[in-house]
Protein backbone atom coordinates (compact mmCIF):
# COMPACT_ATOMS: atom_id res chain seq x y z
CA UNK A 1 0.00 0.00 0.00
CA UNK A 2 1.09 3.57 -0.65
CA UNK A 3 1.32 6.09 2.19
CA UNK A 4 -1.88 7.70 0.92
CA UNK A 5 -3.73 4.35 0.94
CA UNK A 6 -2.47 3.64 4.48
CA UNK A 7 -3.73 7.05 5.64
CA UNK A 8 -7.14 6.57 4.00
CA UNK A 9 -7.57 3.13 5.57
CA UNK A 10 -6.63 4.53 8.97
CA UNK A 11 -9.15 7.36 8.65
CA UNK A 12 -11.98 5.06 7.54
CA UNK A 13 -11.24 2.49 10.27
CA UNK A 14 -11.22 5.24 12.90
CA UNK A 15 -14.50 6.64 11.61
CA UNK A 16 -16.08 3.19 11.91
CA UNK A 17 -14.98 2.92 15.54
CA UNK A 18 -16.30 6.42 16.32
CA UNK A 19 -19.66 5.54 14.76
CA UNK A 20 -19.83 2.26 16.66
CA UNK A 21 -19.05 3.88 20.01
CA UNK A 22 -21.47 6.73 19.31
CA UNK A 23 -24.24 4.13 18.95
CA UNK A 24 -23.32 2.64 22.35
CA UNK A 25 -23.35 5.96 24.24
CA UNK A 26 -26.36 6.28 26.49
CA UNK A 27 -27.81 2.81 25.89
CA UNK A 28 -27.73 -0.48 27.77
CA UNK A 29 -25.11 -2.74 26.22
CA UNK A 30 -25.73 -6.43 25.60
CA UNK A 31 -23.55 -9.16 27.20
CA UNK A 32 -20.33 -9.50 25.21
CA UNK A 33 -20.93 -6.26 23.32
CA UNK A 34 -18.68 -4.10 25.49
CA UNK A 35 -16.38 -4.26 28.51
CA UNK A 36 -17.85 -5.85 31.66
CA UNK A 37 -15.77 -3.56 33.86
CA UNK A 38 -14.00 -0.27 33.09
CA UNK A 39 -11.36 0.50 35.75
CA UNK A 40 -9.68 3.90 36.06
CA UNK A 41 -6.79 4.25 38.52
CA UNK A 42 -6.25 7.27 40.80
CA UNK A 43 -3.22 8.35 42.80
CA UNK A 44 -5.10 8.84 46.09
CA UNK A 45 -8.56 9.02 47.69
CA UNK A 46 -9.06 12.68 46.74
CA UNK A 47 -8.42 11.92 43.07
CA UNK A 48 -10.62 8.82 43.28
CA UNK A 49 -13.49 10.96 44.56
CA UNK A 50 -12.99 13.45 41.71
CA UNK A 51 -12.96 10.68 39.08
CA UNK A 52 -16.00 8.88 40.50
CA UNK A 53 -18.00 12.09 40.54
CA UNK A 54 -17.15 12.89 36.92
CA UNK A 55 -17.86 9.35 35.69
CA UNK A 56 -21.19 9.24 37.51
CA UNK A 57 -22.15 12.57 35.88
CA UNK A 58 -21.14 11.19 32.47
CA UNK A 59 -23.33 8.13 33.00
CA UNK A 60 -26.28 10.29 34.11
CA UNK A 61 -25.85 12.50 31.02
CA UNK A 62 -25.72 9.31 28.89
CA UNK A 63 -22.26 10.10 27.53
CA UNK A 64 -21.03 6.54 28.24
CA UNK A 65 -22.47 3.07 27.52
CA UNK A 66 -24.86 1.98 30.26
CA UNK A 67 -25.02 -1.36 32.10
CA UNK A 68 -21.23 -1.36 32.53
CA UNK A 69 -19.42 -1.44 35.88
CA UNK A 70 -17.29 1.72 36.08
CA UNK A 71 -14.78 1.50 38.94
CA UNK A 72 -12.11 3.89 40.23
CA UNK A 73 -9.33 2.33 42.31
CA UNK A 74 -6.88 4.51 44.22
CA UNK A 75 -3.34 3.59 45.19
CA UNK A 76 -2.85 2.83 48.89
CA UNK A 77 -1.54 5.71 51.05
CA UNK A 78 2.20 5.96 51.51
CA UNK A 79 4.97 5.48 48.95
CA UNK A 80 4.45 6.04 45.23
CA UNK A 81 3.98 2.63 43.59
CA UNK A 82 3.96 3.45 39.85
CA UNK A 83 1.54 2.07 37.27
CA UNK A 84 2.88 -1.44 37.86
CA UNK A 85 1.95 -1.21 41.52
CA UNK A 86 -1.44 0.24 40.54
CA UNK A 87 -1.98 -2.73 38.22
CA UNK A 88 -1.32 -5.22 41.01
CA UNK A 89 -3.53 -3.41 43.54
CA UNK A 90 -6.31 -3.03 40.94
CA UNK A 91 -6.25 -6.78 40.31
CA UNK A 92 -6.51 -7.30 44.08
CA UNK A 93 -9.50 -4.95 44.32
CA UNK A 94 -11.22 -6.67 41.39
CA UNK A 95 -10.70 -10.01 43.11
CA UNK A 96 -12.09 -8.63 46.39
CA UNK A 97 -15.14 -7.16 44.63
CA UNK A 98 -16.10 -10.01 42.31
CA UNK A 99 -14.61 -13.11 43.94
CA UNK A 100 -14.51 -16.14 41.64
CA UNK A 101 -16.66 -14.32 39.08
CA UNK A 102 -13.62 -12.16 38.20
CA UNK A 103 -12.47 -15.08 36.05
CA UNK A 104 -15.40 -14.47 33.68
CA UNK A 105 -14.89 -10.73 33.18
CA UNK A 106 -13.38 -8.70 30.37
CA UNK A 107 -11.81 -5.67 31.99
CA UNK A 108 -10.11 -2.56 30.66
CA UNK A 109 -7.70 -0.97 33.15
CA UNK A 110 -6.81 2.66 32.35
CA UNK A 111 -3.89 4.14 34.27
CA UNK A 112 -4.85 7.73 35.06
CA UNK A 113 -3.25 8.36 38.47
CA UNK A 114 -0.78 11.20 38.98
CA UNK A 115 -0.76 14.99 39.08
CA UNK A 116 -0.12 15.65 35.39
CA UNK A 117 2.66 18.16 36.05
CA UNK A 118 3.54 18.31 32.36
CA UNK A 119 -0.08 19.18 31.39
CA UNK A 120 -1.35 21.10 34.44
CA UNK A 121 -4.80 21.82 32.97
CA UNK A 122 -5.46 18.11 33.64
CA UNK A 123 -4.15 18.20 37.21
CA UNK A 124 -7.33 19.03 39.13
CA UNK A 125 -9.89 16.89 37.30
CA UNK A 126 -7.59 14.26 35.73
CA UNK A 127 -5.90 13.59 32.37
CA UNK A 128 -8.48 10.91 31.52
CA UNK A 129 -10.98 13.82 31.43
CA UNK A 130 -8.94 15.95 29.02
CA UNK A 131 -11.27 17.44 26.39
CA UNK A 132 -10.92 16.64 22.69
CA UNK A 133 -12.54 18.63 19.85
CA UNK A 134 -14.87 15.95 18.50
CA UNK A 135 -18.14 14.19 19.31
CA UNK A 136 -21.52 15.34 20.49
CA UNK A 137 -21.58 15.39 23.50
CA UNK A 138 -17.92 16.45 23.51
CA UNK A 139 -15.39 13.63 23.87
CA UNK A 140 -12.84 13.47 26.63
CA UNK A 141 -9.90 11.05 26.67
CA UNK A 142 -12.03 8.44 28.47
CA UNK A 143 -14.50 8.23 25.58
CA UNK A 144 -11.69 8.18 23.02
CA UNK A 145 -9.86 5.32 24.77
CA UNK A 146 -13.10 3.32 24.85
CA UNK A 147 -13.71 4.16 21.19
CA UNK A 148 -10.30 3.01 19.99
CA UNK A 149 -10.73 -0.37 21.71
CA UNK A 150 -14.45 -0.76 20.99
CA UNK A 151 -13.86 -3.91 18.87
CA UNK A 152 -11.69 -5.71 21.43
CA UNK A 153 -14.19 -7.19 23.96
CA UNK A 154 -15.96 -9.25 21.30
CA UNK A 155 -12.72 -11.12 20.48
CA UNK A 156 -11.26 -11.40 23.95
CA UNK A 157 -11.14 -14.17 26.53
CA UNK A 158 -11.65 -13.13 30.18
CA UNK A 159 -8.72 -11.02 31.29
CA UNK A 160 -7.47 -7.46 31.59
CA UNK A 161 -6.39 -4.93 28.95
CA UNK A 162 -3.86 -2.48 30.43
CA UNK A 163 -3.51 0.98 28.91
CA UNK A 164 -2.62 4.60 29.79
CA UNK A 165 -4.80 7.71 29.87
CA UNK A 166 -2.63 10.07 27.81
CA UNK A 167 -2.07 8.30 24.51
CA UNK A 168 -4.08 7.54 21.39
CA UNK A 169 -3.58 4.49 19.18
CA UNK A 170 -5.19 4.43 15.75
CA UNK A 171 -5.02 1.33 13.56
CA UNK A 172 -6.63 -0.38 10.62
CA UNK A 173 -6.86 -4.09 9.75
CA UNK A 174 -8.46 -5.87 6.82
CA UNK A 175 -12.20 -6.64 6.97
CA UNK A 176 -11.69 -10.38 7.45
CA UNK A 177 -9.32 -9.90 10.42
CA UNK A 178 -9.85 -9.03 14.09
CA UNK A 179 -7.51 -8.21 16.95
CA UNK A 180 -7.90 -11.26 19.19
CA UNK A 181 -6.81 -11.58 22.80
CA UNK A 182 -7.22 -15.32 23.28
CA UNK A 183 -3.72 -16.61 24.06
CA UNK A 184 -2.26 -17.40 27.49
CA UNK A 185 0.23 -14.98 29.06
CA UNK A 186 0.73 -11.40 27.90
CA UNK A 187 -0.39 -10.18 24.46
CA UNK A 188 0.91 -6.73 23.46
CA UNK A 189 0.03 -4.39 20.62
CA UNK A 190 3.05 -3.20 18.61
CA UNK A 191 3.39 -0.23 16.28
CA UNK A 192 6.09 0.45 13.65
CA UNK A 193 8.02 3.51 14.86
CA UNK A 194 11.20 5.41 13.96
CA UNK A 195 14.28 4.38 15.96
CA UNK A 196 14.23 7.76 17.74
CA UNK A 197 10.78 6.95 19.19
CA UNK A 198 12.08 3.56 20.34
CA UNK A 199 14.57 5.27 22.69
CA UNK A 200 11.66 6.63 24.80
CA UNK A 201 9.34 3.59 24.60
CA UNK A 202 9.38 -0.16 24.94
CA UNK A 203 10.75 -2.09 21.92
CA UNK A 204 9.94 -5.70 20.92
CA UNK A 205 12.68 -8.01 19.65
CA UNK A 206 11.10 -10.47 17.22
CA UNK A 207 12.40 -13.54 15.41
CA UNK A 208 14.33 -12.57 12.27
CA UNK A 209 11.78 -14.05 9.86
CA UNK A 210 9.10 -11.88 11.49
CA UNK A 211 10.90 -8.53 11.39
CA UNK A 212 9.86 -7.03 8.06
CA UNK A 213 6.78 -4.87 7.79
CA UNK A 214 4.94 -7.13 5.36
CA UNK A 215 2.04 -6.52 3.05
CA UNK A 216 -0.47 -7.32 5.80
CA UNK A 217 -1.95 -4.80 8.19
CA UNK A 218 -1.82 -7.19 11.14
CA UNK A 219 0.39 -10.13 12.17
CA UNK A 220 0.41 -12.34 15.27
CA UNK A 221 3.94 -13.23 16.34
CA UNK A 222 5.89 -14.33 19.40
CA UNK A 223 8.52 -12.13 21.02
CA UNK A 224 12.09 -13.05 21.93
CA UNK A 225 12.51 -10.25 24.46
CA UNK A 226 11.39 -6.75 25.36
CA UNK A 227 13.68 -3.71 25.69
CA UNK A 228 12.68 -0.69 27.80
CA UNK A 229 13.80 2.71 26.45
CA UNK A 230 16.90 1.25 24.75
CA UNK A 231 19.64 3.18 22.94
CA UNK A 232 19.75 2.91 19.13
CA UNK A 233 22.88 0.77 19.46
CA UNK A 234 21.12 -1.57 21.90
CA UNK A 235 18.25 -1.96 19.40
CA UNK A 236 20.71 -2.85 16.65
CA UNK A 237 22.74 -5.24 18.82
CA UNK A 238 19.56 -7.01 19.98
CA UNK A 239 18.17 -7.48 16.47
CA UNK A 240 15.15 -5.22 17.08
CA UNK A 241 15.66 -3.08 13.96
CA UNK A 242 13.46 -3.99 10.99
CA UNK A 243 13.55 -2.97 7.32
CA UNK A 244 10.51 -1.42 5.71
CA UNK A 245 8.52 -3.07 2.97
CA UNK A 246 5.20 -2.05 1.43
CA UNK A 247 2.09 -1.94 3.60
CA UNK A 248 3.70 -0.16 6.51
CA UNK A 249 2.45 3.16 7.91
CA UNK A 250 6.05 4.49 8.16
CA UNK A 251 8.18 6.07 5.49
CA UNK A 252 11.45 5.31 7.35
CA UNK A 253 13.63 2.61 5.80
CA UNK A 254 14.48 1.28 9.26
CA UNK A 255 12.04 1.00 12.14
CA UNK A 256 11.29 -0.82 15.38
CA UNK A 257 8.05 -2.13 16.86
CA UNK A 258 7.14 -0.13 19.98
CA UNK A 259 4.64 -0.83 22.77
CA UNK A 260 1.36 0.78 23.81
CA UNK A 261 -1.30 -1.50 25.31
CA UNK A 262 -1.24 -5.10 26.49
CA UNK A 263 -3.62 -7.83 27.61
CA UNK A 264 -3.17 -10.46 30.32
CA UNK A 265 -5.39 -13.52 30.40
CA UNK A 266 -7.17 -14.51 33.61
CA UNK A 267 -4.63 -17.17 34.66
CA UNK A 268 -1.79 -14.65 34.27
CA UNK A 269 -3.80 -12.09 36.24
CA UNK A 270 -4.06 -14.68 39.06
CA UNK A 271 -0.29 -15.15 38.83
CA UNK A 272 0.19 -11.39 39.21
CA UNK A 273 -2.02 -11.48 42.32
CA UNK A 274 0.24 -14.14 43.78
CA UNK A 275 3.19 -11.89 42.92
CA UNK A 276 1.63 -9.09 45.00
CA UNK A 277 1.31 -11.46 47.96
CA UNK A 278 4.96 -12.43 47.51
CA UNK A 279 6.13 -8.79 47.33
CA UNK A 280 4.10 -7.58 50.32
CA UNK A 281 3.38 -3.85 50.84
CA UNK A 282 5.07 -1.88 48.04
CA UNK A 283 7.50 0.88 48.93
CA UNK A 284 8.85 1.75 45.47
CA UNK A 285 7.60 2.53 41.96
CA UNK A 286 7.02 -0.42 39.64
CA UNK A 287 6.62 0.11 35.89
CA UNK A 288 3.79 -1.90 34.32
CA UNK A 289 5.78 -1.98 31.09
CA UNK A 290 9.49 -1.95 31.92
CA UNK A 291 9.31 -4.15 35.02
CA UNK A 292 6.72 -6.67 33.78
CA UNK A 293 7.46 -7.03 30.07
CA UNK A 294 11.26 -7.16 30.39
CA UNK A 295 10.86 -10.39 32.36
CA UNK A 296 9.08 -12.06 29.41
CA UNK A 297 10.26 -13.87 26.29
CA UNK A 298 12.74 -16.77 25.94
CA UNK A 299 15.77 -14.44 25.73
CA UNK A 300 14.91 -12.26 28.74
CA UNK A 301 17.81 -11.80 31.16
CA UNK A 302 17.93 -10.50 34.72
CA UNK A 303 20.42 -7.73 33.76
CA UNK A 304 17.77 -5.01 33.44
CA UNK A 305 16.86 -5.26 37.14
CA UNK A 306 20.02 -3.31 38.06
CA UNK A 307 19.45 -0.54 35.49
CA UNK A 308 17.86 2.40 37.29
CA UNK A 309 18.68 5.05 34.66
CA UNK A 310 15.00 5.64 33.79
CA UNK A 311 13.75 5.70 37.38
CA UNK A 312 12.51 9.06 38.75
CA UNK A 313 13.24 8.14 42.38
CA UNK A 314 15.42 5.19 43.23
CA UNK A 315 14.39 3.29 46.35
CA UNK A 316 16.65 0.78 48.07
CA UNK A 317 14.15 -2.04 47.56
CA UNK A 318 13.72 -1.50 43.79
CA UNK A 319 16.37 -3.92 42.51
CA UNK A 320 15.27 -6.65 44.91
CA UNK A 321 11.62 -6.25 43.89
CA UNK A 322 12.51 -6.26 40.18
CA UNK A 323 14.40 -9.50 40.67
CA UNK A 324 11.40 -11.08 42.39
CA UNK A 325 9.18 -9.95 39.48
CA UNK A 326 11.67 -11.40 36.98
CA UNK A 327 11.80 -14.82 38.64
CA UNK A 328 8.02 -14.89 39.10
CA UNK A 329 7.17 -14.00 35.48
CA UNK A 330 10.05 -15.73 33.68
CA UNK A 331 8.71 -18.24 31.18
CA UNK A 332 5.35 -16.46 30.78
CA UNK A 333 4.58 -16.11 27.04
CA UNK A 334 4.82 -12.69 25.37
CA UNK A 335 2.67 -12.65 22.24
CA UNK A 336 2.74 -9.59 20.00
CA UNK A 337 0.12 -8.30 17.57
CA UNK A 338 1.90 -6.23 14.92
CA UNK A 339 -0.38 -3.42 13.77
CA UNK A 340 1.51 -2.45 10.63
CA UNK A 341 -0.86 0.34 9.68
CA UNK A 342 -1.13 2.15 12.99
CA UNK A 343 -0.25 5.43 14.65
CA UNK A 344 0.64 6.16 18.27
CA UNK A 345 0.07 9.68 19.63
CA UNK A 346 1.12 10.85 23.09
CA UNK A 347 -0.79 13.80 24.61
CA UNK A 348 0.89 14.13 27.99
CA UNK A 349 2.59 17.53 27.82
CA UNK A 350 1.48 21.09 27.04
CA UNK A 351 3.51 21.17 23.80
CA UNK A 352 2.16 17.78 22.63
CA UNK A 353 -1.38 18.85 23.51
CA UNK A 354 -1.09 22.09 21.52
CA UNK A 355 0.57 20.43 18.54
CA UNK A 356 -1.89 17.56 18.19
CA UNK A 357 -5.00 19.72 18.67
CA UNK A 358 -3.99 22.65 16.46
CA UNK A 359 -1.17 21.78 14.04
CA UNK A 360 -1.16 18.03 13.46
CA UNK A 361 -2.86 17.72 10.07
CA UNK A 362 -2.62 13.91 10.06
CA UNK A 363 -4.38 13.44 13.41
CA UNK A 364 -7.00 16.06 12.51
CA UNK A 365 -7.82 14.13 9.34
CA UNK A 366 -7.72 10.68 10.96
CA UNK A 367 -9.89 11.58 13.97
CA UNK A 368 -11.98 14.31 12.38
CA UNK A 369 -10.91 16.91 14.94
CA UNK A 370 -12.69 20.29 14.80
CA UNK A 371 -11.33 23.81 15.32
CA UNK A 372 -14.41 24.63 17.40
CA UNK A 373 -16.37 22.04 19.38
CA UNK A 374 -19.39 22.64 21.64
CA UNK A 375 -18.67 26.38 21.73
CA UNK A 376 -20.37 29.65 20.85
CA UNK A 377 -18.54 32.49 19.04
CA UNK A 378 -20.90 35.46 19.10
CA UNK A 379 -19.25 37.28 16.20
CA UNK A 380 -19.33 34.16 14.01
CA UNK A 381 -16.08 35.35 12.44
CA UNK A 382 -14.13 32.48 10.86
CA UNK A 383 -10.93 34.37 11.62
CA UNK A 384 -11.67 34.46 15.36
CA UNK A 385 -10.08 31.03 15.78
CA UNK A 386 -7.74 30.83 12.80
CA UNK A 387 -5.31 27.99 13.47
CA UNK A 388 -6.44 27.63 17.09
CA UNK A 389 -8.85 25.28 18.85
CA UNK A 390 -11.84 26.22 21.03
CA UNK A 391 -13.74 23.65 23.12
CA UNK A 392 -16.65 23.98 25.56
CA UNK A 393 -16.35 27.79 25.65
CA UNK A 394 -18.30 31.03 25.17
CA UNK A 395 -16.57 33.78 23.18
CA UNK A 396 -18.19 37.23 23.07
CA UNK A 397 -18.01 39.69 20.16
CA UNK A 398 -14.61 40.54 18.76
CA UNK A 399 -12.64 37.73 20.43
CA UNK A 400 -9.65 36.22 18.66
CA UNK A 401 -7.66 33.06 19.38
CA UNK A 402 -4.14 32.92 17.97
CA UNK A 403 -2.76 30.12 15.81
CA UNK A 404 -1.64 27.09 17.80
CA UNK A 405 -3.64 28.08 20.91
CA UNK A 406 -6.31 26.12 22.81
CA UNK A 407 -9.19 27.66 24.77
CA UNK A 408 -11.30 25.21 26.81
CA UNK A 409 -14.03 25.40 29.46
CA UNK A 410 -13.76 29.21 29.45
CA UNK A 411 -15.77 32.40 29.06
CA UNK A 412 -14.07 35.18 27.08
CA UNK A 413 -15.52 38.70 27.27
CA UNK A 414 -15.80 41.01 24.26
CA UNK A 415 -12.59 41.89 22.40
CA UNK A 416 -10.43 39.41 24.34
CA UNK A 417 -7.38 38.25 22.39
CA UNK A 418 -5.34 35.11 23.00
CA UNK A 419 -1.80 35.12 21.63
CA UNK A 420 -0.23 32.31 19.61
CA UNK A 421 0.65 28.96 21.18
CA UNK A 422 -1.13 29.46 24.52
CA UNK A 423 -3.55 27.44 26.65
CA UNK A 424 -6.48 29.11 28.45
CA UNK A 425 -8.38 26.59 30.56
CA UNK A 426 -11.35 27.02 32.92
CA UNK A 427 -10.98 30.81 32.95
CA UNK A 428 -13.38 33.77 33.00
CA UNK A 429 -11.69 36.60 31.10
CA UNK A 430 -12.86 40.23 31.39
CA UNK A 431 -13.58 42.19 28.18
CA UNK A 432 -10.61 43.70 26.39
CA UNK A 433 -7.87 41.66 28.05
CA UNK A 434 -4.96 40.19 26.08
CA UNK A 435 -3.44 36.82 26.90
CA UNK A 436 0.26 36.74 25.88
CA UNK A 437 1.65 34.21 23.41
CA UNK A 438 3.26 30.99 24.64
CA UNK A 439 1.66 30.90 28.09
CA UNK A 440 -0.52 28.57 30.11
CA UNK A 441 -3.36 29.95 32.26
CA UNK A 442 -5.69 27.81 34.35
CA UNK A 443 -8.23 28.80 37.02
CA UNK A 444 -9.10 26.58 39.97
CA UNK A 445 -11.75 26.96 42.64
CA UNK A 446 -10.26 26.37 46.10
CA UNK A 447 -11.47 26.12 49.68
CA UNK A 448 -9.77 28.86 51.70
CA UNK A 449 -10.77 29.59 55.31
CA UNK A 450 -14.06 27.75 54.76
CA UNK A 451 -14.93 29.89 51.73
CA UNK A 452 -14.84 29.27 47.97
CA UNK A 453 -12.06 31.31 46.36
CA UNK A 454 -10.23 31.25 43.03
CA UNK A 455 -6.61 30.86 41.97
CA UNK A 456 -5.37 31.30 38.39
CA UNK A 457 -2.00 29.67 37.83
CA UNK A 458 0.24 30.72 34.95
CA UNK A 459 3.41 29.32 33.42
CA UNK A 460 5.31 29.44 30.16
CA UNK A 461 4.29 26.63 27.81
CA UNK A 462 7.81 25.17 27.99
CA UNK A 463 8.42 25.74 31.72
CA UNK A 464 9.65 22.69 33.63
CA UNK A 465 7.36 22.39 36.64
CA UNK A 466 9.19 19.30 37.91
CA UNK A 467 12.69 20.82 38.03
CA UNK A 468 13.56 21.40 41.67
CA UNK A 469 16.33 22.91 43.79
CA UNK A 470 17.31 21.92 47.31
CA UNK A 471 16.39 25.16 49.08
CA UNK A 472 14.80 28.59 48.46
CA UNK A 473 18.31 30.08 48.36
CA UNK A 474 18.78 28.47 44.94
CA UNK A 475 15.54 29.80 43.41
CA UNK A 476 17.61 31.73 40.85
CA UNK A 477 17.80 28.41 38.95
CA UNK A 478 14.01 28.19 38.63
CA UNK A 479 12.71 29.86 35.46
CA UNK A 480 9.16 31.17 34.97
CA UNK A 481 8.48 32.12 31.32
CA UNK A 482 12.26 32.24 30.81
CA UNK A 483 12.91 34.62 33.75
CA UNK A 484 14.43 33.70 37.11
CA UNK A 485 11.97 33.60 40.00
CA UNK A 486 13.94 36.35 41.77
CA UNK A 487 13.44 38.67 38.81
CA UNK A 488 9.72 37.82 38.70
CA UNK A 489 9.32 38.57 42.39
CA UNK A 490 10.97 41.96 41.98
CA UNK A 491 8.52 42.82 39.18
CA UNK A 492 5.66 42.14 41.64
CA UNK A 493 7.19 44.17 44.48
CA UNK A 494 8.00 41.07 46.52
CA UNK A 495 11.26 40.21 48.31
CA UNK A 496 12.76 36.80 47.59
CA UNK A 497 12.78 35.85 51.29
CA UNK A 498 8.99 36.35 51.32
CA UNK A 499 8.45 33.53 48.80
CA UNK A 500 7.03 30.42 50.40
CA UNK A 501 7.29 26.87 48.98
CA UNK A 502 4.56 24.43 49.98
CA UNK A 503 5.25 20.81 50.90
CA UNK A 504 8.76 19.37 51.11
CA UNK A 505 11.19 22.22 51.98
CA UNK A 506 14.09 20.31 50.38
CA UNK A 507 12.36 20.28 46.99
CA UNK A 508 11.58 23.76 45.66
CA UNK A 509 10.04 24.00 42.18
CA UNK A 510 7.54 25.99 40.12
CA UNK A 511 5.02 23.33 41.16
CA UNK A 512 5.18 24.24 44.85
CA UNK A 513 6.20 27.91 44.62
CA UNK A 514 3.46 30.07 46.21
CA UNK A 515 3.13 32.64 43.42
CA UNK A 516 -0.57 32.86 42.62
CA UNK A 517 -3.10 35.21 44.28
CA UNK A 518 -6.18 33.85 46.05
CA UNK A 519 -9.17 35.93 44.91
CA UNK A 520 -12.85 36.14 45.73
CA UNK A 521 -14.10 35.54 42.19
CA UNK A 522 -12.97 33.86 38.98
CA UNK A 523 -12.80 37.02 36.89
CA UNK A 524 -10.71 38.95 39.41
CA UNK A 525 -8.41 35.94 39.81
CA UNK A 526 -7.66 35.86 36.09
CA UNK A 527 -7.16 39.63 35.92
CA UNK A 528 -4.55 39.66 38.71
CA UNK A 529 -2.65 36.73 37.27
CA UNK A 530 -2.55 38.10 33.72
CA UNK A 531 -1.31 41.47 35.06
CA UNK A 532 1.47 39.68 36.97
CA UNK A 533 2.35 37.73 33.84
CA UNK A 534 2.42 40.83 31.64
CA UNK A 535 4.66 42.64 34.15
CA UNK A 536 7.21 39.84 33.87
CA UNK A 537 7.08 39.64 30.06
CA UNK A 538 7.21 43.42 29.50
CA UNK A 539 9.77 44.15 32.26
CA UNK A 540 7.29 46.45 34.01
CA UNK A 541 6.00 46.66 37.58
CA UNK A 542 2.81 45.25 39.08
CA UNK A 543 2.72 45.64 42.84
CA UNK A 544 0.57 43.06 44.58
CA UNK A 545 -1.63 44.43 47.39
CA UNK A 546 0.09 43.84 50.72
CA UNK A 547 -2.55 41.51 52.13
CA UNK A 548 -2.62 39.19 49.08
CA UNK A 549 -2.58 35.51 50.00
CA UNK A 550 -0.46 33.45 47.56
CA UNK A 551 -0.81 29.75 46.78
CA UNK A 552 1.18 27.22 44.76
CA UNK A 553 -0.21 24.88 42.11
CA UNK A 554 0.43 22.02 44.53
CA UNK A 555 -1.49 23.75 47.35
CA UNK A 556 -4.38 24.69 45.04
CA UNK A 557 -4.87 21.02 44.15
CA UNK A 558 -4.83 19.94 47.80
CA UNK A 559 -7.65 22.35 48.67
CA UNK A 560 -9.55 22.37 45.35
CA UNK A 561 -13.33 22.74 45.55
CA UNK A 562 -14.29 19.92 43.23
CA UNK A 563 -18.06 20.39 43.48
CA UNK A 564 -17.86 24.09 42.65
CA UNK A 565 -15.52 23.45 39.66
CA UNK A 566 -17.97 20.92 38.23
CA UNK A 567 -20.90 23.28 38.95
CA UNK A 568 -19.14 25.99 36.93
CA UNK A 569 -18.77 23.56 34.03
CA UNK A 570 -22.43 22.62 34.32
CA UNK A 571 -23.41 26.30 34.20
CA UNK A 572 -21.22 26.77 31.13
CA UNK A 573 -22.80 23.70 29.53
CA UNK A 574 -26.29 25.08 30.15
CA UNK A 575 -25.39 28.51 28.74
CA UNK A 576 -23.79 27.07 25.60
CA UNK A 577 -26.76 24.76 25.05
CA UNK A 578 -29.18 27.66 25.53
CA UNK A 579 -27.27 29.93 23.12
CA UNK A 580 -27.07 27.16 20.52
CA UNK A 581 -30.80 26.46 20.76
CA UNK A 582 -31.52 30.21 20.42
CA UNK A 583 -29.39 30.33 17.29
Image (tube, grey):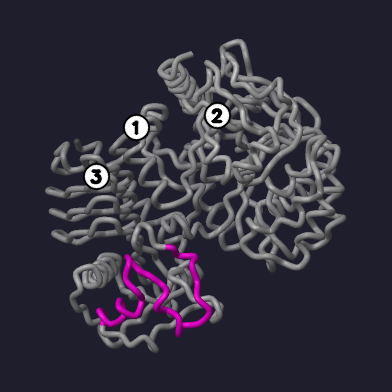
Which stretch is magenta?
A: 464-492
Report which residue position mark 2 lands on.
254
Q: Is residue 163 visible?
A: yes
Quadrant position of residue 447: bottom left
Quick check: 337 left or right of 94? left
- Determine crowd level at label 2: few under 14, some 14-19, many 20+ residues with C-alpha closer than 10 A: some
Q: Is residue 227 above or below residue 255?
A: below
Residue 490 within the segment the image draws in magenta: yes
Counting residues from the N terminus, which is met first, the one under dot 3 or under dot 2? 2
Foreground tag (1 vs 2):
2
Q: Tell me the residue at 31%/55% (across/down).
A: 424
The residue pinned by badge 1 equals 361
Q: Residue at x 43, y 19 (%)?
A: 3
Residue found farthest to the top: 176
Residue 329: horizontal and vertical position, in percent? 83, 43
The label shown at residue 553 is none
Q: Secondary structure at mark 1?
A: helix
Q: Position of residue 333 (x, y in %)?
A: 80, 33
Identify the residue at image location x=34%, y=51%: 409
Q: Which mark is residue 403?
A: 3
| Residue 541 located left or right of residue 485 | left
Q: CA distance from mark 3 to mark 1?
A: 14 Å
Lateral position of residue 309 relative to residue 406, left or right: right
Amino acid sequence: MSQEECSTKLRLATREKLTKFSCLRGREVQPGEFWDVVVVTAVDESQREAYELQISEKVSRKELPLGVHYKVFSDPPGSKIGNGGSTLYSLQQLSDLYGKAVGTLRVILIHAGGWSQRLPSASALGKIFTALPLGDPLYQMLELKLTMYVDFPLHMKPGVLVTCADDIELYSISEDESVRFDKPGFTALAHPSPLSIGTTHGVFVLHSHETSCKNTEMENVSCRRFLHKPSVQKMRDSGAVCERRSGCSLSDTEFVYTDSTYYVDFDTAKSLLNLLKELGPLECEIDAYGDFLQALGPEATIDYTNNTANVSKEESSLVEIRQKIFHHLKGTPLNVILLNNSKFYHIGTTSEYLFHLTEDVALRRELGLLTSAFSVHLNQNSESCSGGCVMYSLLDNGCSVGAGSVVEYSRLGAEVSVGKGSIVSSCRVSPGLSVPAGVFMYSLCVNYKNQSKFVTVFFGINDDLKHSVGAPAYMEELKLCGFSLMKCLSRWGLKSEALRFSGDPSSCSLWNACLFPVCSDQQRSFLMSVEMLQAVLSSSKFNLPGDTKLMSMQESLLCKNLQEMLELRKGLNDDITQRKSND
